Structure formats: structure tokens, C-alpha cells
């Protein structure tokens, strides 16, 4: 990989923003594992931009929810925001945009599936948001969030409620809802769990996450979509 001459034009088209300073986007896509492999010279990586993007995302999403749901209390708005900006939702967005093809990883992270790792893909949504803000200010940052996250907000905020909604559906059909742990893999600090929904003994969708609860929530959310309930 030629780090200095990487081209991001196709990705910028998908994002919907053309950088005035392309080095900001390159930094936003550089994982710390790549930077750590070069001890002689410092290579900027995305953690600081992710920190900035996280704060901007919280502000923009909070404002959008405040305006959309005037009847909700602070606690209810907080719950919706947590669902909207959760790891699953953000990683699905960046996966669809092809961020995994452009993220700059160290060899070890590359070999262990970093391009598909939800936690990294989630981070990239926020780091690129931070880069857009630094390059063009709040307006393009807001447009990025609105275009890729705030569309179809009702469906995206269902994630944290997916298990409850699916349980209510199963009960209404007189069926038992269960989650089967199919697999757990990876080192202790990066353990990945795979769970599958079963309704009345019939297998449905599969979810993967770094916790059993997260894997169950993802499987439930996918099943709701398959059943047309979200």
C-alpha cells in the first residue's frame, strides 16, 4: 500500500462530500494499528478525529430528535439517540458505503478481519464526520449526518427495542422466542459472539457482536426487518 498516494475519489462520491484537504480524509481512515507499525515517523491516525466526530454527531442527532419528537421526555430522547447512534447502525452505514475497502490497517489487524469489524466501521463514521467538519465546517457535517443517518430515522431507532418488539410479536402468535448461541471466536479482548433467533423452533436471522446481548439484538433487529415489522 502506498500510503501517501492513496486515492479516495470513489469514496468521496459515495459520501457526498469532496475534501479540500484530502489528507484529512486519509487520517480519518487510518487505524492506530497502521500508525503503530511505523515507529520512525509519526503517522496521524483517526482517534482524535473520532473524538471530535462523536461530539458533533451527538449534537446533530440530539437536535434532530428534539425537533422530530416534541412529545418525548429527556429520558426517552436519550434512549432514542442511543439507539440511533449505536455501533450496529453506524457500522451498517459505513459498510454500505464501502469504508472497509479504504480503511488503512496494520498487518495484524488486517489478518484478523479488521475491515469487517463493526467497532472499527462504527469509529470510521465518526472520524470521517470529524474530518468533514475540519475541512468544511458544520454545514457539510450536518448534511453528511442527515444524508446517511437521519433518513429513515424511525427504523434506525428500533434497534435497542428490537428484542422487546420481537418478544411481543412471538407472544401474540402463541410462539416461544429463543436465542441460540451458535459460535464464539477470537481472543478474549476481541471476542465475537454469533446468535440466532428462533421463533417456535424455526430459525431466523443471525447476529454478530462483541457481546452476547449485542449479537441477540442484531439478530432480533434483522428478524424484525425480515418479518416486515420494522
Image (cartoon, grey):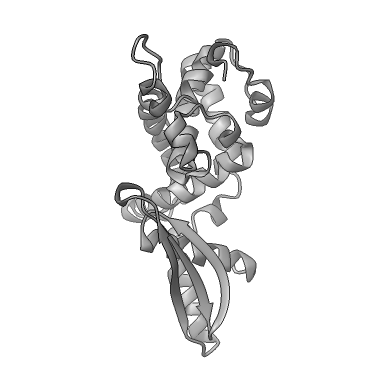
Foreground of the two, 229 or 34:
34
Residue 158 vertical placement versus 20 (above, below): below
Please name the residue shown 40% across and 61% down the image: 184
Return the x and y of residue 195 as percentages of the image width and height: 46, 67
Return the x and y of residue 133 as percentages of the image width and height: 48, 21
Return the x and y of residue 216 as percentages of the image width and height: 44, 65
Residue 126 appears in the figure: no
The answer to which image quadrant residue 100 occupies is top right
* Quadrant placement of the N terminus: top right
- Which residue is situated farthest in the bottom direction here? 174
Foreground of the two, 86 or 73:
86
The answer to which image quadrant residue 154 occupies is bottom right
Residue 150 vertical placement versus 1 (above, below): below
Please name the residue shown 67% across and 20% down the image: 9
Please name the residue shown 56% across and 63% down the image: 222
Residue 103 appears in the figure: yes
* Quadrant placement of the C terminus: bottom right
Return the x and y of residue 4 as percentages of the image width and height: 54, 11
Foreground of the two, 168 or 76:
168
Please name the residue shown 39% across and 28% down the image: 33
Residue 30 falls left or right of residue 99: left
Amino acid at each position: 500500500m502506498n500510503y501517501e498516494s492513496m486515492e479516495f475519489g470513489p469514496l468521496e462520491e459515495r459520501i457526498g462530500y469532496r475534501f479540500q484537504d484530502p489528507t484529512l480524509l486519509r487520517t480519518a481512515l487510518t487505524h492506530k494499528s497502521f500508525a503503530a507499525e511505523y515507529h520512525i515517523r509519526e503517522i496521524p491516525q483517526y482517534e482524535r478525529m473520532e473524538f471530535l466526530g462523536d461530539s458533533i454527531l451527538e449534537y446533530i442527532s440530539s437536535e434532530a430528535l428534539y425537533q422530530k419528537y416534541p412529545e418525548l421526555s429527556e429520558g426517552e430522547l436519550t434512549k432514542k439517540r442511543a439507539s440511533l447512534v449505536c455501533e450496529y447502525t453506524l457500522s451498517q452505514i459505513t459498510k454500505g458505503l464501502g469504508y472497509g475497502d479504504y480503511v488503512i490497517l496494520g498487518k495484524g489487524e488486517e489478518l484478523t478481519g479488521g475491515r469487517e469489524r463493526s467497532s472499527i466501521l462504527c469509529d470510521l463514521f465518526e472520524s470521517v464526520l470529524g474530518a468533514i467538519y475540519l475541512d468544511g465546517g458544520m454545514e457539510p457535517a450536518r448534511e453528511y449526518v442527515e444524508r446517511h443517518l437521519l433518513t429513515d430515522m424511525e427504523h434506525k431507532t428500533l434497534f435497542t427495542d428490537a428484542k422487546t418488539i420481537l418478544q411481543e410479536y412471538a407472544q401474540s402468535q402463541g410462539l416461544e422466542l429463543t436465542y441460540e448461541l451458535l459460535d464464539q471466536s477470537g481472543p478474549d479482548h476481541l471476542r465475537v459472539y454469533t446468535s440466532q433467533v428462533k421463533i417456535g423452533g424455526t430459525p431466523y436471522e443471525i447476529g454478530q457482536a462483541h457481546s452476547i446481548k449485542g449479537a441477540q439484538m442484531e439478530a432480533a433487529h434483522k428478524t424484525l426487518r425480515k418479518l416486515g415489522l420494522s
